[in-house]
Amino acid sequence: MFQIDSLSGILVIGSFVLASLAFCVTLFLFFKQRVLERKLALFFSGKSAKTLENVLTEQLKQTKELDHDIQELFDATEKLRTLSFSGLHKYAVLRFNPFKEVGSNQSFSVALLDGNNSGVVISSLHTREGTRVYAKPVLKGKDAGFPFTEEEKNVILKAAAIQVIAS
């Protein structure tokens, strides 16, 4: 009979294990390659490398155009934001009686302010002899050369408290 010494047996078994492992890895890579080939066939269906280059070039061109459009929209938004701060959109009305125990709340103050709390306060004082109307400029919530009455200060504070939506 033919005898295999122990070292040769270990070498044969090791070789068999390595060959089996190599076969399994080869089989795994074969199936992995088939999956990739199917995906590539689907991706390249009806296209050549030249047409893919054209597609990528067109996509890059469209991306640049969209970036330009987005920048224009951003600029327009900034202009609108700036314009919104210059329009009068904060207001408050306060009716009051300047003469205690006589008459009623027929006098009033109206504050009309922009986003920077600048604008005008209009006050009307009603008396038995007539009605007087005063207009005073408001600059960032403060008087601009004409001192405010308490009622005017209150109506300006009330109007200035209105929140402007801006980011």
Image (cartoon, rainbow, N blue to C red):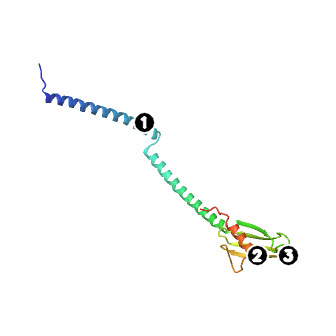
Q: Establish if 61 lies above or below 52.
A: below
Q: For mark 1, does the 10 Å Cα neighbourhood hold few (<14), some (14 to 19), or many (20 or more) residues?
A: few
> Residue under circle 3?
127
x 76%, y 76%: residue: 135
> Residue under circle 2?
135
Q: Which residue is most to the front?
A: 101
Judged by depth in the image, the label closer to the viewer, 1 or 3, is: 3
Callout 2: helix, strand or loop?
strand
Image coordinates for residue 113, horizontal then vertical, percent: 70, 69
Residue 30, quarter of the rendered image:
top left
Amino acid marked by disc 3: Thr
Q: Which residue is most to the top?
A: 1
Judged by depth in the image, the label closer to the viewer, 3 or 2, is: 3
Image coordinates for residue 151, horizontal then vertical, percent: 74, 72
Amino acid marked by disc 1: Arg
Q: For mark 2, does the 10 Å Cα neighbourhood hold few (<14), some (14 to 19), or many (20 or more) residues?
A: some
Q: Is residue 120 left or right of residue 131?
A: left
Q: Is residue 89 left or right of residue 69?
A: right
x 42%, y 36%: residue: 38
> Residue under circle 1?
38
Give the Cα distance between marks 2 and 1.
80 Å
Q: Mark 2 vs mark 1: which is more N-terminal?
A: 1
x 78%, y 73%: residue: 123
Q: Mark 3 vs mark 2: which is more N-terminal?
A: 3
Is residue 87 visible in this depiction of the protein? no
The quadrant of the image that shows the N terminus is: top left
Is residue 52 visible in this depiction of the protein? yes
Amino acid marked by disc 2: Ala
